[in-house]
């Protein structure tokens, strides 16, 4: 059987992975390619399912592909192969959570039982140009800084996104910082909203392939080995075990756009990311919203699928009681 060309899309929370993936899927459609997508969310609800309605989507919820549900990823890939036998797919995209180490996803795909069916083409890492420097300095936890580094070092292509939010000088600073971590061969695309030449992005980059840190075995080129050995030596960067937490709020009452924005913007700095669905006062239906880089975006269009309102927040060292109290005071009290 021909191996399924597979891509890993990684990047820190809110960097723009899903935005990029949507462009990629559009491209596949135009090329008459049938894609499958594996989405991994840290929360227990996939608040982005509405974006992928027509796609062949496999969801892994409430975890991080790289550790707690690593076995689940194997099961999902096996299920995907069964589907593939009936209705073949042309390409697979795996979007990791914002705290996944892409090389560990590569490791699962490259495990002995799966390596004959999937072939990694590229590990794409999306970076938020507007918060990269800040993320490097605000995260005092070594594990988080290592994670950010590994997301970049493990990449074969880097998408430097959100350049619309920085000026030329800041961009140069980010580029200079990146240059210290990246190999000279790693291709870098500077963009906003993931708007890049997708054909070029999807070119096969053979550098990073099989890595097995369990067996310390490498069956590929030496470039990948140098990544993997470095990877063997560092301690696991399972950052959500050491600071990153998720909060899923359900039974959210109807509220105004203004109230939601005000509350999200009032949250402590530790909240890195928010997303969900809300019911808006005086408007019919349920509306998706996004919160990242201290910006709130609430969709103008209501959601077609029936879904319960919910808010998922992801943050570092969050004081849950504090969030709960502010939610009660500002949102749930009418
Ligand atoms: N200003 C600006 N906003 C962007 C850009 N790219 C994405 N966004 C917005 O940033 C928010 C997060 O984007 P996503 O694509 O969902 O990010 P993600 O990496 O999938 O986020 P996680 O699911 O947390 O891992 C959304 O509101 C996007 O519309 C960009 O280049 N510039």
Image (cartoon, rainbow, N blue to C red):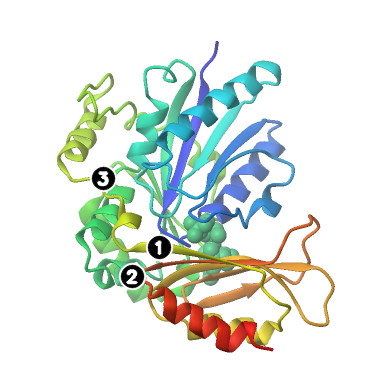
Residue at 71% from the left image edge and 81% from the top image edge = 255
The image shows residue 268 at horizontal and vertical percentages of 41, 81
Of callouts 3 and 2, which one flags the residue occurring earlier in the amino acid sequence?
3
The correct choice, above or below, for 315 with respect to 47 in the image is below
The correct choice, above or below, for 301 with respect to 212 in the image is below
Helix, strand or loop at disc 3?
Answer: loop
Observer able to see residue 119: yes
The quarter of the picture where the N terminus appears is top right
Question: Relative to 98, is 176 on the left or the right?
Answer: left
The image shows residue 182 at horizontal and vertical percentages of 26, 49
Q: Give the number of the mark in front: 1 or 3.
A: 1
Of callouts 1 and 3, which one flags the residue occurring earlier in the amino acid sequence?
3
Disc 1 to disc 3: CB gap under 8 Å: no
Helix, strand or loop at disc 1?
Answer: strand
Determine which residue is flagged by label 2.
Answer: 317
Of callouts 2 and 1, which one flags the residue occurring earlier in the amino acid sequence?
1
Determine which residue is flagged by label 3.
Answer: 184
The quarter of the picture where the C terminus appears is bottom right
Determine which residue is flagged by label 1.
Answer: 245
Label 2 environment density (alpha carbons within 10 Å; few <14, some 14–19, many ≥20): some
In three-dimensional space, the C-alpha distance between marks 2 and 1, rounded to whole angstroms, equals 7 Å
Disc 2 to disc 1: CB gap under 8 Å: yes
Residue at 48% from the left image edge and 67% from the top image edge = 273
Label 3 environment density (alpha carbons within 10 Å; few <14, some 14–19, many ≥20): few
Question: Relative to 315, is 6 on the left or the right?
Answer: right
Label 1 environment density (alpha carbons within 10 Å; few <14, some 14–19, many ≥20): many
In three-dimensional space, the C-alpha distance between marks 3 and 2, rounded to whole angstroms, equals 35 Å
Observer able to see residue 156: no
């Amino acid at each position: 059987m021909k191996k399924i060309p597979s891509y890993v899309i990684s990047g820190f929370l809110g960097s723009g992975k899903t935005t990029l993936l949507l462009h990629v899927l559009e491209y596949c459609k135009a090329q008459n390619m049938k894609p499958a997508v594996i989405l991994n969310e840290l929360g227990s609800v996939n608040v982005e399912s509405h974006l992928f309605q027509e796609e062949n989507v496999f969801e892994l919820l409430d975890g991080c592909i790289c550790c707690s549900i690593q076995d689940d990823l194997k099961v999902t890939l096996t299920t995907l192969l069964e589907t593939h036998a009936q209705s073949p797919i042309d390409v697979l995209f795996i979007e990791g959570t914002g705290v996944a180490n892409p090389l560990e996803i590569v490791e699962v795909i490259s495990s002995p039982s799966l390596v004959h069916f999937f072939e990694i083409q590229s590990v794409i890492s999306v970076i938020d140009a507007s918060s990269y420097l800040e993320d490097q300095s605000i995260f005092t936890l070594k594990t988080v800084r290592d994670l950010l580094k590994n997301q970049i070092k493990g990449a074969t292509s880097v998408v430097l996104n959100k350049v619309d939010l920085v000026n030329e000088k800041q961009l140069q600073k980010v580029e200079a910082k990146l240059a210290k971590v990246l190999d000279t061969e790693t291709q870098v695309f500077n963009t906003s909203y993931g708007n890049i030449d997708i054909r070029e992005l999807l070119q096969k980059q053979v550098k990073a392939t099989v890595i097995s840190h369990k067996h310390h075995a490498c069956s590929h080129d030496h470039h990948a080995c140098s990544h993997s050995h470095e990877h063997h030596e560092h301690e696991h960067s399972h950052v959500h075990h050491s600071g990153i937490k998720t909060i899923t709020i359900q039974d959210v009452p109807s509220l105004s756009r203004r109230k939601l924005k005000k509350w999200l913007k009032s949250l402590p700095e530790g909240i890195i990311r928010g997303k969900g669905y809300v019911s808006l006062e005086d408007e019919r239906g349920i509306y998706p919203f996004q919160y990242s880089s201290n910006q709130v975006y609430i969709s103008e269009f209501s959601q077609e699928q029936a879904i319960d309102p919910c808010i998922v927040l992801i943050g570092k060292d969050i004081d849950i009681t504090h969030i709960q109290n502010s939610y009660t005071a500002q949102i749930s009290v009418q």
